[in-house]
Image (cartoon, coloured by chain):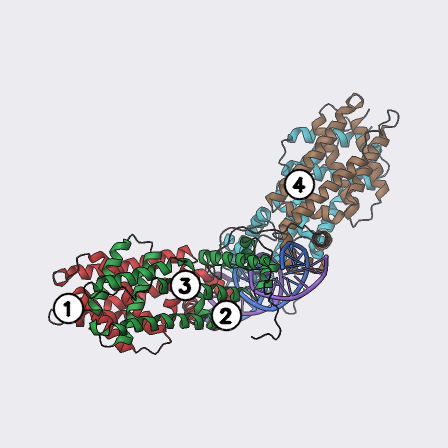
Chain colours: A brown, B cyan, C red, D green, E blue, F purple
Amino acid sequence: MENAERKVRIPKQKRGLKTKEQIIEAGLTLFSDRGFYKTNSKEIAAEAGVAIGSFYAYFKDKKTLFLEIMTKYFKMVADTLKNSGTNNTFDINNKQMFIHTLVRNILSAHEISPGFHREISIVMNSDPDIDRIVTEHEDRILENTLKTLKQYKDYIRVEDLETAAVIVYRCIEEIVHTIKFSKSTTDENRLVNELVDMISRYLFD
Amino acid sequence: MENAERKVRIPKQKRGLKTKEQIIEAGLTLFSDRGFYKTNSKEIAAEAGVAIGSFYAYFKDKKTLFLEIMTKYFKMVADTLKNSGTNNTFDINNKQMFIHTLVRNILSAHEISPGFHREISIVMNSDPDIDRIVTEHEDRILENTLKTLKQYKDYIRVEDLETAAVIVYRCIEEIVHTIKFSKSTTDENRLVNELVDMISRYLFD
Amino acid sequence: MENAERKVRIPKQKRGLKTKEQIIEAGLTLFSDRGFYKTNSKEIAAEAGVAIGSFYAYFKDKKTLFLEIMTKYFKMVADTLKNSGTNNTFDINNKQMFIHTLVRNILSAHEISPGFHREISIVMNSDPDIDRIVTEHEDRILENTLKTLKQYKDYIRVEDLETAAVIVYRCIEEIVHTIKFSKSTTDENRLVNELVDMISRYLFD
Amino acid sequence: MENAERKVRIPKQKRGLKTKEQIIEAGLTLFSDRGFYKTNSKEIAAEAGVAIGSFYAYFKDKKTLFLEIMTKYFKMVADTLKNSGTNNTFDINNKQMFIHTLVRNILSAHEISPGFHREISIVMNSDPDIDRIVTEHEDRILENTLKTLKQYKDYIRVEDLETAAVIVYRCIEEIVHTIKFSKSTTDENRLVNELVDMISRYLFD
DNA sequence: GATGAATGAGGTTTCATTCAT
DNA sequence: CATGAATGAAACCTCATTCAT
């Protein structure tokens, strides 16, 4: 009774491309606002202003849409980080500024879509496919962080750079996350200042 | 205190008490393993070895069970932190040890049920009731952290203690989380060491 | 995202047994009347007077229901044929009577549910599972037919009994089928008479 | 003749004619292989190498395509039977040969597209339009059979020729069907031989 | 003529929850 | 107290068909 493999439409006309884009946009909005499990395909289609059939023409299912948005999102994050890179900001007389720039960059990377970023870590746990992609993304960022640390290793007091990269990356991420989502009244600038202070004292003499 | 139109059974006999306990245990296991949205009430009942009817006799719905487990879980975490408190570990000549103990305590608090802890932050986002309880719990811990910092403020170089408390708590949480869930090979001891080093240098001269 | 294997309810109370029976009954009726592809699970549930949920509690899907009905049906056919067996009807002086009884028996086996019988051969073609069961059933009947022929082989003029069994069985089936479904006005008795005549002359001198 | 609100394209150029032919060919293939209900219009269009739009330009709907293929198929069957007619094969000294030719003709008529022939009897049940056409076709063949029998009625021992025609036609059809679709190992030649033997003894002294 | 994107009715299936036993 | 059968809203997904290009 079951039939062969599904066929996903690959848009060839500009019309189709637009439709697919609309669905992705709608998915991003709803996943961010309501979360993956509280959003259903019909709502996404409605938000995108297309029929449910179009949804399934372009995406095998909700998860696939999520995956595609995520991949796209990670690409944007990577681009943001790359473009606003810290490569030329290192100043031996003002090492704090270097860290400050790093934190601000990650902060702006999160501004792309804070809600979706949060949602990723959620769905991740119950789906290996998503988990894999997230892990790959994080590994790539971690690698970059490590590379940066190695680049300036003469000025850095920490010996275990691999571990330092994890610590620095994770802590910045977490505080950025706190800034974006905490309902508490903690001031953004104060958090950034203290974070930068902490990391600077950790890395540099 | 509220009574109105109660429907939930309050176990008075040891049999009923045991049944309720089994359901909570099963819920904890399954929510941790598969997540809230991927676990259904029938499975919980099955895991608990009781009929679905019993589930709804003791819990208004799936969310209520989650709430109850969460409350219980937070109480255990608080107890763990309190019992293994840092109150008497401060030694002016070995301030690192103080931080080290703090980190280890949070680590052991996480050992109660790492999976469930992670799951909480997931459901939180889509439910205000849960979110409120989580926030309250975190606020309490934060308050304690702040109180501790204030207690030793003469030895601490940081001025903005409120922010410092947030930073310290969040970063420890995050690294503990990394240790518990990261598939990467980063060694637990190295992470703890670097974390302790970072926080120590941040707080103390 | 996908979960483990489905669980089909196995009725333990008499209530559940009755429900399952009702669904089977409804399936038989609708499959016979409208055909497999023109009947949907909701209609079956409605006809059975139960909720759609109950349908899926007892049957994995529509096909599984069909399979189960079919198996049951074949058992009834086999029983009918066995009970009204031809074993003691052979009379050397009236061999025609023997064939006549055989045809009448198959005819009454078809009376159990002519519509469903027809439907089987339909669904069969697009589903290997169903096909297998049908083939097994037919092989069993064929075997019986052959056994009967062998029993009276001293009175039979045909040498190739294997082929004769196929011919006899298939032709009786087909004419019975014609009787049950032909919109043409051909008279049942006349068809039976001629059929019996043909087979008698074929088998006996 | 009827025109009213026609929407179906009538091909006038050779290009359109070819497209229509391709769709018919594809429909025949897929209906035969997978069955009517398991084949969808998109697949037919794909198999034909045309767009789905073209499908609906030439055929009102899937059923209409089926109907058209069927009509065409019946015409071919009729032609096959006519061309290889039995009219001049009757030999008073070898009546068996006459039946043999008859069976072989029907057999070759089935070779046109055995799968489609089988499929017809399927869809037939759930559609009156198709049923009507099938019945008409069968009636025509039956009529021919009867005519043939009448032609040689002096040599035929059976009195009820109407019924005999039905019996003969149906049994040949069924055995041909068995030959074409049976997974069993029964040999074609043996089946044909026995069938011919049976019918010969039935019709002739 | 030809294309393939878009539609949406309607089928399939799940699962939180209620209720009869 | 405990059981598990029954419910049905709501999710998921397909496909015949129409329509813009």
What numbered label is drawn on residue C43? 2
**Residue C74 occupies quadrant:** bottom left
Q: Nearer the viewer, residue B70 or D64?
A: D64
For disc 2, the chain is C
Kindly identify which residue carries mark 1: C90
Q: CA distance from mark 1 to mark 4?
A: 79 Å
Q: CA distance from mark 1 to mark 3?
A: 35 Å
Kindly identify which residue carries mark 3: C122
Q: CA distance from mark 2 to mark 4?
A: 45 Å
Q: What residue lies at 20% left-to-right and 69% top-to-bottom? A: D204
For disc 3, the chain is C
Amino acid marked by disc 4: Val
Q: What residue lies at 71% left-to-right and 25% top-to-bottom? A: A160
Q: Secondary structure at mark 1?
A: loop
Amino acid marked by disc 2: Glu
Amino acid marked by disc 1: Phe
Above or below B40: residue D86: below
Q: Secondary structure at mark 4?
A: helix
Tell me whether marks 1 and 3 sit on the same chain.
Answer: yes
Q: CA distance from mark 3 to mark 2?
A: 20 Å
Kindly identify which residue carries mark 4: A134
Q: CA distance from mark 1 to mark 2?
A: 47 Å
Side of C61 relative to D186 (left or right): right
